[in-house]
Each structure stands twice: as C-alpha cells, then as structure tokens.
Image (cartoon, rainbow, N blue to C red):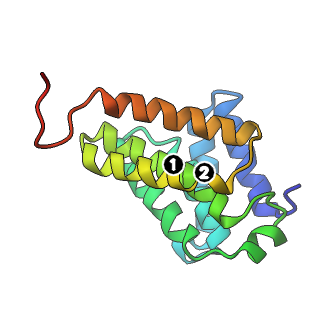
Amino acid sequence: MVTDDTLARINQGVQLHHHQGQREAARDLFAQIWDEIGGERGDPLHVCVLAHSMADVQDDVHQELVWDQRALAAADLLTDDRVAQAGVPMSVAGLYPSLHLNLGECHRKLGDLDQARECLQRAQAGMGALGDDEYAQLIRSGLDRLAQQLASEPARGTTRD
C-alpha cells in the first residue's frame, strides 16, 4: 500500500487520465506537483513516477520522450529502500520494464526503430523482476504489441522481400 502523499496525488492524476478521460486536468495536476517537488531536483521516486505519468498525457511525442527520459534518469537514482519506504510494492528493478517499454514506444513513433528495438530488448530483459500479477501481464502485453509493431518494420540496412 502506497503511503507517500505525493505518490497518492500523482495517482489522483493517473485516475483523472485513465479512468475519467480528463487528460488536460491530469496534465495540469502533474505540472503543479512537478513545481512543488522542485522538478528534476526533487526526490528521485517522485520525479520518476511523476515524469512517467506526465509522459502519458503529452500531445507531442517529442515531449513524451523528454518526460520518459526524465523518468528513466530518476529511476537510476532510486534505491529499493526508498521505494519500500514509500509503500511501493515492487523493487526498483521492477520499474524498468515499463520505463523501457514507454521509451521504445516513443522511439517507434518517431521512426527510430533501432533505438525502439534496443528499448524493447532492455524491457524484456528486465521482466524477471516482475511476478505474474496483473501489472506484469499489462507490461508483457505492451511488450508483445511493441514487438509485433517492430517486427513489421525492417531493421535499418535490410530490405523486405
């Protein structure tokens, strides 16, 4: 159970977006929280989760990529102790498959298929950190979808028959 007030507020924004279809309201709330935590200088857990969520409400894929990169950079500063202290029910390693999946999606949308494939491989390699719960199944489904999309695209330097 998440016990961190900032994470709870971020979750409110996620609910606004995913369950109530209020993308702009979620983006506004995330921007307010971003300012409150001090942006990238904030607690890496807050930065990671907030940037990961903020990426989802961007209209421009370039901005989505910037937010996803911020989330990944913040994850690199996290410890399992900090994650547990906040009541997050997974290890830091469990965050990476989703972070790499989102980065892969951005790179695919931008046409950087080699980078998208690299992100996909990193995400797949990190799946062992997740169990077999609903969250892990959601990430696996996203990875399968990205893999299928990338499989239909030729790697650079190759041609289709």
Residue 146 figure quarter = top left
Quarter of the image that includes the N terminus:
bottom right
Give the number of the disc on residue 124: 1
**Cα distance in 3D space between marks 2 and 1:** 5 Å
The one nearer the camera, 110 or 94, is 94
Locate residue 132 relative to residue 28 in the image: left or right.
Answer: right
Q: Is residue 161 left or right of residue 34?
A: left
**Which residue is at the front of the view, 66 or 113?**
113
Quadrant of residue 137 in the image? top right
Q: Quadrant of the C terminus?
A: top left
| Callout 2: SS | helix
The answer to whether residue 64 is seen in the rendering is no
Classed neighbour count for the residue bearing mark 2: other residues with Cα under 10 Å, few (<14), some (14–19), many (≥20):
many
- Residue 58 in the image: state x and y as whole percent: 46, 42
152 or 4: nearer the eye?
152
Discs 2, 1 touching: Cβ within 8 Å: yes
Residue type at numbered disc 1: Gln
Q: Is residue 109 visible?
A: yes
Give the vertical position of 45 relative to 131 (above or below): below
Residue type pointed to by label 2: Met
Q: Residue at x 41, y 35 (%)?
A: 147
The x, y position of residue 116, in whole percent, is: 34, 46
* Relative side of 101 to 47, left or right: left
In the picture, the disc for residue 127 is 2
Q: Residue at x 87, y 62 (%)?
A: 3
Vertical position of residue 156 compared to residue 42: above or below: above
